[in-house]
Image (cartoon, rainbow, N blue to C red):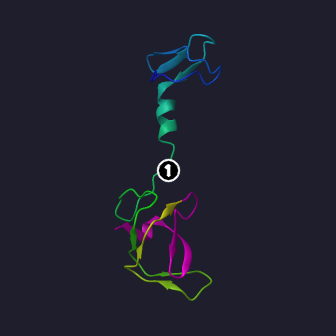
Amino acid sequence: MSAIPACPQCTLENTYADGANYICADCGYEWPISAELEAESDEAVVKDSNGTVLKDGDAVVLIKDLKVKGSSITLKQGTKVKSIRLVGGDHEVDCRMEGGSFMLKACFLKKA
C-alpha cells in the first residue's frame, strides 16, 4: 500500500509528491503535504496540571477541593478517579465518582 494518499478532489490514486505538494496526474489538483500531517494530528491533546498527556481510561487524582455547582457536594483533594473519558468542550474529562457523574477540567487533575 502506498504512503501517498488518493486525490481529495477526484479520489483517484494516481498521485505523486513534488516538492512540498502532492499532485494528481489525472485531474491536475495540487495540495500541500503538510495538510496530511495536520489532519492526522487534528485531535485535541488534553494535558493534566503537570503537563502529562491524558487519554481515555487513565486514572487521575484531584489536586484541589472542588465545589459542585448547584449542590452541597464537595469533591475532596486526593480523590482518585478511575477510568476517565475525554470529551470536547469547556470541560475535558467525564468521570464517575461516588457522588455521581461529573465533568471536570483537566487543570484540576494529575495523572495517577
Identify which residue, 52 or 59, lies in the foreground. Answer: 59
The stretch in magenta equals 87-112
The image position of residue 73, as x and y in percent, is 54, 86
Residue 57 falls in which quadrant of the image? bottom left
The residue depicted at 34 percent of the width and 63 percent of the height is 50
The image position of residue 18, as x and y in percent, is 46, 14
Residue at the extreme top: 25
Confirm whether the magenta stretch covers residue 54. Answer: no
Which three-letter amino acid code belongs to the residue tagged 1? Answer: Ala
Residue 31 falls in which quadrant of the image? top right
46 left or right of 28? left
Q: Look at the numbered disc 1 and give the secondary structure of its residue.
A: loop
Q: Give the vertical position of 87 relative to 81 (above or below).
A: above
The count of marks equals: 1
Confirm whether the magenta stretch covers residue 94. Answer: yes
112 left or right of 92? left
The image position of residue 28, as x and y in percent, is 60, 12
Identify which residue, 105 or 11, lies in the foreground. Answer: 11
The residue depicted at 55 percent of the width and 73 percent of the height is 102
Q: Give the vertical position of 19 relative to 51 (above or below).
A: above
Which quarter shows the C terminus?
A: bottom left
Q: Give the vertical position of 105 relative to 87 (above or below).
A: below
Identify which residue, 90 or 11, lies in the foreground. Answer: 11
The image position of residue 30, as x and y in percent, is 56, 18
102 left or right of 61? right
Q: Give the vertical position of 94 relative to 56 (above or below).
A: below
The residue depicted at 38 percent of the width and 75 percent of the height is 63
Residue at the extreme front: 1
Q: Which residue is mark 1?
A: 44
The residue depicted at 55 percent of the width and 65 percent of the height is 91
Graded by Cα atoms within 10 Å as few (under 14), some (14 to 19) or many (20 or more), the crowding at tag 1 reads few
